[in-house]
Image: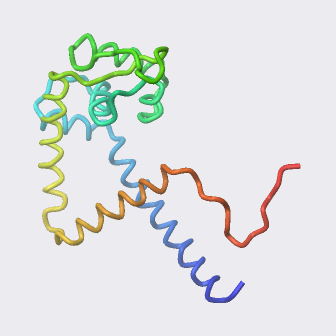
């Protein structure tokens, strides 16, 4: 392997560790229950904190089945099923049969639920403006572009291994 490729790989490895650390910091902050409580309070909505990410998820990704929602929020599907039922009781979501697979019931946000998520979006916008208020618009645009590119890459199928190393095969 040429020396320049080794230097580039070392640089990438160092930056990947730095990126991983930054992502862990962001995930830790986003997973704090207090962050949801701040958004709920800022939005002025009467909603249990445990239901909050599910309502937002149905609003963003719905119609969505319980299993997919459970994967997205990192909870057991039986717990998510009970919580989605609670959102349905509150009139914030409806469950209906999937057009693709009638065995699957999908959650869809209602007008009442959309009104709540609109208030959450407005609160998130106010908080985001405070965080990014001192950034140059070009920096913010570049962050958004690169985060979208990164999110698309990590959610796509993994590429074939082509790192110059021999392929490891199971025997």
81 in relation to 135, above or below: above
Q: Percent x, y for residue 85?
A: 34, 13
Of residues 145 and 103, the one nearer the viewer is 103
Residue at 17% across, 69% down: 137
159 in relation to 82, above or below: below
Residue extending furthest toward the top: 89
Count of residue discs = 0
Quarter of the image with the N terminus is: bottom right
169 in relation to 79, above or below: below
Residue extending furthest toward the bottom: 3
Residue at 89% across, 49% down: 171
Would residue 136 be found to the left or right of residue 31 on screen?
A: left
Would residue 29 be found to the left or right of residue 127 on screen?
A: right
Which image quadrant for residue 13? bottom right
Which image quadrant for residue 57? top left
Q: Which colour scheme is used?
A: rainbow
Residue extending furthest toward the right: 171
Q: Percent x, y for residue 18?
A: 46, 67
Of residues 22 and 145, the one nearer the viewer is 145
1 in relation to 159, above or below: below
Q: Percent x, y for residue 125?
A: 15, 48
Would residue 120 be found to the left or right of residue 60 on screen?
A: left
Residue at 66% across, 89% down: 3
């Amino acid at each position: 392997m040429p020396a320049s490729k080794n230097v580039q790989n070392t640089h990438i490895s160092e930056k990947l560790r730095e990126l991983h650390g930054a992502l862990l910091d962001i995930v830790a902050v986003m997973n704090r229950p207090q962050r949801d409580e701040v958004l709920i309070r800022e939005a002025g909505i009467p909603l249990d904190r445990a239901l909050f990410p599910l309502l937002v998820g149905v609003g963003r990704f719905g119609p969505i089945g319980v299993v997919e929602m459970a994967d997205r929020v990192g909870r057991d599907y039986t717990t998510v099923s009970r919580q989605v039922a609670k959102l349905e009781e509150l009139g914030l979501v409806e469950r209906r049969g999937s057009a693709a697979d009638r065995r699957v019931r999908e959650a869809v946000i209602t007008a009442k639920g959309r009104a709540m998520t609109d208030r959450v979006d407005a609160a998130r916008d106010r908080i985001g403006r405070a965080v990014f208020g001192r950034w140059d618009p070009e920096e913010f645009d570049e962050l958004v572009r690169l985060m979208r590119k990164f999110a698309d890459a990590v959610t796509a199928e993994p590429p074939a291994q082509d790192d110059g190393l021999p392929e490891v095969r199971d025997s």
